Amino acid sequence: MSDALRSDLEEALRFLNHSERAGRLDRADLAATLQALVETLVAHGVVPPAEYERRRQRALDAQKMALEEQSDVRLGPAVDKYALTDVPKIDCASIIPICKSRCCTLAVYCSAQDLDEHIVQWDYARPYRIRKREDGYCVHSEPETGRCGVYEKRPAVCRSYDCRNDKRIWVDFEKRILREG
């Protein structure tokens, strides 16, 4: 795919996803209106509180199931990744042979800044999550070395991530004992 076509596709998908977010605000307004209506009906004794709660819980369970089946559109944190100063001091180069860059298998979402730069690739099926290779690693993680291929342009989440206390990665960081799996 040409760079121009990829850029156009990304812009179109970004527009669609932003439109979807606007729809979420409309749904939040509807939910607030319904909540106010129900509270008024309960307060005036029109609907018994126990019956309302039972029906509400059943409807909520159904909505949660429906949400789990839908894709989630997320953006990374809205910070200037180049201005971050409080980043962990970890010698990743010496740890990669041990950890095999496991942090590069975690879900990371691009920020608007990342999207504007058109460097970090994201998964069109999971907006705006960084695209993964078939082996589950970030597409920017170099398979031979585990190093980041877009290190200077990497997202804020990657810049500020501290694996030392992440139980998904380490059983004991100081002793260099990895979690299995």
Image (tube, rainbow, N blue to C red):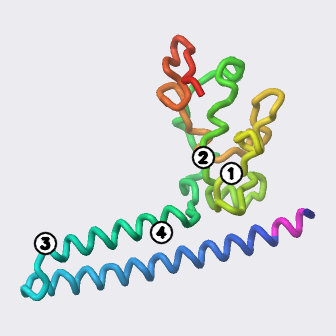
Label located before the other in sequence (3 or 2): 3
**Residue at the image position 80 percent from the left and 27 percent from the top:** 145
Earlier-in-chain disc, 2 versus 1: 2
Residue 63: where, in percent of width, then height? 41, 70
- The quarter in which the C terminus is drawn is top right
Q: Which mark is residue 107?
A: 2
Answer whether labels 2 and 1 touch (C-beta < 8 Å).
yes
- Provide the major secondary structure of the magenta segment: helix
Q: Earlier in the sequence, mark 4 or mark 1?
A: 4
- Could you tell me the amino acid type at mark 1? Ile
Q: Nearer the viewer, mark 4 or mark 1?
A: 4
**Residue nearest the observer in this picture, 131 or 136:** 136
Cα separation, mark 4 vs mark 2, equals: 22 Å
Q: Which residues are magenta?
A: 3-7
Residue under numbered circle 3: 50
Residue type at mark 2: give it: Ala
Percent coordinates x, y for residue 87 in the rendering? 55, 34
Q: Is residue 5 magenta?
A: yes
Residue plotted at (13% across, 72% down): 50
Q: Earlier in the sequence, mark 4 or mark 2?
A: 4
Q: Residue under label 4, please give it.
A: 66
Q: Residue at x 91, y 63 (%)?
A: 1
12 on left or right of 77: right
Q: Residue at x 44, y 82 (%)?
A: 26
Q: Earlier in the sequence, mark 1 or mark 3?
A: 3
